[in-house]
Amino acid sequence: MDFSNLGELESGVYWPKLQPFFLKSSFRRLTYRLNSLPSRSLAKNSVLSRRGASGAGELDVAYIADHCAATLLITETGLPDYCLTFIRRGVLMCSGVDSPGLFTAKKGVGLIYRGLPGTALAATSDHERVAIWIPAESVRQRLVAMLGGPMHEDVTFDPLFDLDTRGGRKIRSLMNLLMGELGPDRSFSGNSLAYRSFTDLLIYAMLEGLPNSYSKRLDPRYASPIPGIVRRAEEYIRSHSEQPITLTDLAAAAGCSVRNLQIGFRRFRDTTPANAILSARLESLRRGIVGGSVNGTVTDIAYQYGFTNPGRLTALYKAAFGMSPTDILCRHRAGVSQR
């Protein structure tokens, strides 16, 4: 949506236009205030601001591009969410977050904050950013799974993080994946399994890769995985390879925390739980194609087995088995027709 009317921007009358996204009433606690007026050189009726919104399962994604400097203020009781923000142009100054002080985010420096009342985000003119709102309850559930026990208080993240660190690069690549897959013609659209898997990856990447109040407890040196954990997890993966498996499900089946599960697979199998799930799913798919129980196009099969992108499935399958799923499907159908 493009806006050239200052009154529309400050009054918030555009909120209904963001439907069916940002339906939660808590988002009405975000107020917008212009800090500067358009330059005189700007043509009449020029676009002053651009807004975009999308839902992605549990997540809400917003795009903001402003010609004028502006402040976003969280009012009333705030939002029960964390906001992961990426600056594409300009500078964003944030205050009122869990950690005291003024924090300055720019391109190459990410920002994560809780939607606490009084939080203010002041953007410079010619500013552009993407914000991903993540329910605090979703973060809590994953953290409990990683800890293998209760958490005594909500997790607090260091507000700023470098996108060139190992953790930052992983977060950035996931954000780029999400932005590339949103839209009615993209593979994430309407795919609840894809959204759930992505949310799992994003939140676990945040908890592992971004400094927070639980970082010490999540440190591998404080965990003690045992081979039995890995064996139970592998048995669960084999018996559920055709069903959606999240790391939380897998840790519960193995009887450990998600963190111990990750360490166990890395230490005893030199891989990750996610890669183990992927390998089992590919093997199950191969058996289904060869045995004739799997039919349809590669796109149909990809969605059936939880792959969000048919092209990615083809590449993974060929790397694992030396042939594309299309080749094997064609051979099988040719063999059936000759009988």
Image (spheres, rainbow, N blue to C red):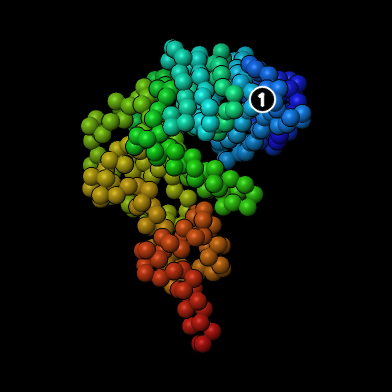
Whole-percent x, y for residue 167 in the image? 36, 35
Residue under label 1, please give it: 25
- In terms of image quadrants, where is residue 73? top right
At horizontal 44% and vertical 38% (from top left) the residue drawn is 172
Side of 19 where 198 appears, left or right: left
Return the x and y of residue 162 as percentages of the image width and height. 39, 30
Q: Nearer the viewer, residue 217 or 322?
A: 322
Q: Nearer the viewer, residue 104 or 216?
A: 104
Q: Residue at x 46, y 58 (%)?
A: 312
Query: Left or right: 174 with respect to 78?
Result: left
Kindly identify the residue that appears in the image at 25 percent across and 39 percent down.
225
Q: Residue 328, relative to residue 190: is it above or below?
A: below
Q: Residues within 10 Å of mark 1 (few under 14, many from 20)?
A: few
Residue at 56% across, 13% down: 118
Image position of 192 with respect to 58: above or below: below
Is disc 1 placed on a helix, strand or loop?
helix
Q: Quadrant of residue 145?
A: top left
Residue 285, position as x, y percentages in the image: 44, 64
Residue 173 image point, x, y percent: 44, 42
Camera-side residue: 233 or 324? Answer: 324
What residue type is disc 1 on?
Ser
Quadrant, the N terminus: top right
- Which residue is the extreme one toward the bottom? 338
**Residue 330 shows in the view:** yes
